[in-house]
Amino acid sequence: MVNTRLLLPGKLTGVEWFTVETLKRLVKWNPHVRFTFLFDRNYSDEFIFGSNVNPVILSPQARHPVLWYAWFEYAVKKAIDNHQPDVFVSPDGFLSLRANIPQIAVIHDLNFVHNPERLPRLTGGYYRHFFAKYATKATRIATVSEYSKSDIANTYHISPEKIDVVYNGVNDTFHVISPKPIIKESKGKPYFLFVGSLNPRKNILGMLRSFEQFKDNTGLPHKLVIVGDPMFKLPKTKAFYSEMTHAQDVKFAGRKDGDELNKMYNGATALWFVSHFEGFGIPIIEAFRAGCPVITATNTSMPEVAGDAALLRDSGDIAGIVNDMAQIATDDQLRTTLIKRGFERAKAFTWEASAQRLWQCIEKTLNVKHA
């Protein structure tokens, strides 16, 4: 049985892509296994990956902390009692504390512990209270990087032996296009690209500050194209943007997926992805696959993911980030070197490997049950 409540057409981000790409393969590879997918509203057939998937809709729709509790502690508990699955797998980390079967929590990161001010108060409070309980309740935990594994073990005082690293992969959509495409947002000018949700941990304010200084220092014609939906209100960021000298060179493109996003990576001078906190950082690998150089952070999981294939700076080092932007914008040899290294680095992250690791985690969990 799998918690698939977050799978909504056109609204897939990191956790949702992990869910889709791993489950798609596990369903195909295990036709003899019956998968029960739990949705909290009418589902799309695109998420029913095989005839061995049994979709079940549970009420209420779990989109608010109070309803999260009702859904997992009552609706999911009842579904578990009715269907008697061997294991409950939750790709977004939420478990049913009242259920007494083996459970796997996929906890992608602990941003809500380390940066509580960057989440709405009620949401952050729920996460901090319940994820400590979920981590203890889980038979096993899966997470997406060695950094997050260590963080979860230390924060919740859990043995690392209970935690499996299941790296994210990258979709086949991302590849090199020749000749390089021109996107409408850049109006034919070179551009830096950001891909991700617009929330504080992504360092959106730092990105605007570094771009403003880059333009002031270099006078180069580059634009900044920002791809992503806003998640939370960012008053300081909005205030800074409204006063930027080069605000006309910042383009908010909204959400982009698939071929359209691939074109944006292909045409970019570099991906700007210098977050304060990441459990993994999927855009780094997407950019590598598309032949796009990357500037990312020394913080949290990003050095682990990027290896030697990107320029790395502390997320608070605006002057250093500006220097990297200028260097990558003017040094063709550096760009060529980073692109080559990026291709090689991306080979380490595939959804096939992710699905295999998640299945191994499931098998370990079932072995505990049958021991």
Image (tube, helix red, strand yellow):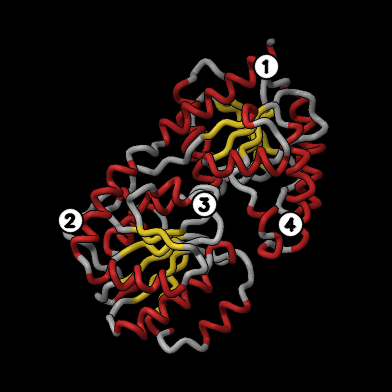
Which numbered circle lies on residue 368?
1
* Residue 182 rendering spot, x and y as whole percentages: 25, 68
Q: Considering the numbered disc 2 on the image, is that residue within a helix, a strand or a loop?
A: loop
First reached walking from the N terminus: tag 4 or tag 2: 4
- Gap between marks 2 and 1, in whole Å? 51 Å
Looking at numbered disc 2 in the image, what kind of residue is underneath it?
Ser
Mark 2 or 1, closer to the camera? 1
Q: Considering the numbered disc 4 on the image, is that residue within a helix, a strand or a loop?
A: helix
Residue positioned 47% across, 56% down in the render: 298
Residue positioned 39% across, 39% down in the render: 349
Mark 3 or 4, closer to the camera? 4
Residue positioned 60% across, 28% down in the render: 54
Q: Is residue 210 visible?
A: yes
Looking at numbered disc 3 in the image, what kind of residue is underneath it?
Thr
First reached walking from the N terminus: tag 3 or tag 2: 3
Relative vertical location of residue 45 with respect to residue 265 in this rendering, above or below? above
| Callout 1–callout 4 Cβ contact below 8 Å | no
Q: Considering the numbered disc 1 on the image, is that residue within a helix, a strand or a loop?
A: helix
Quarter holding the C terminus is top right
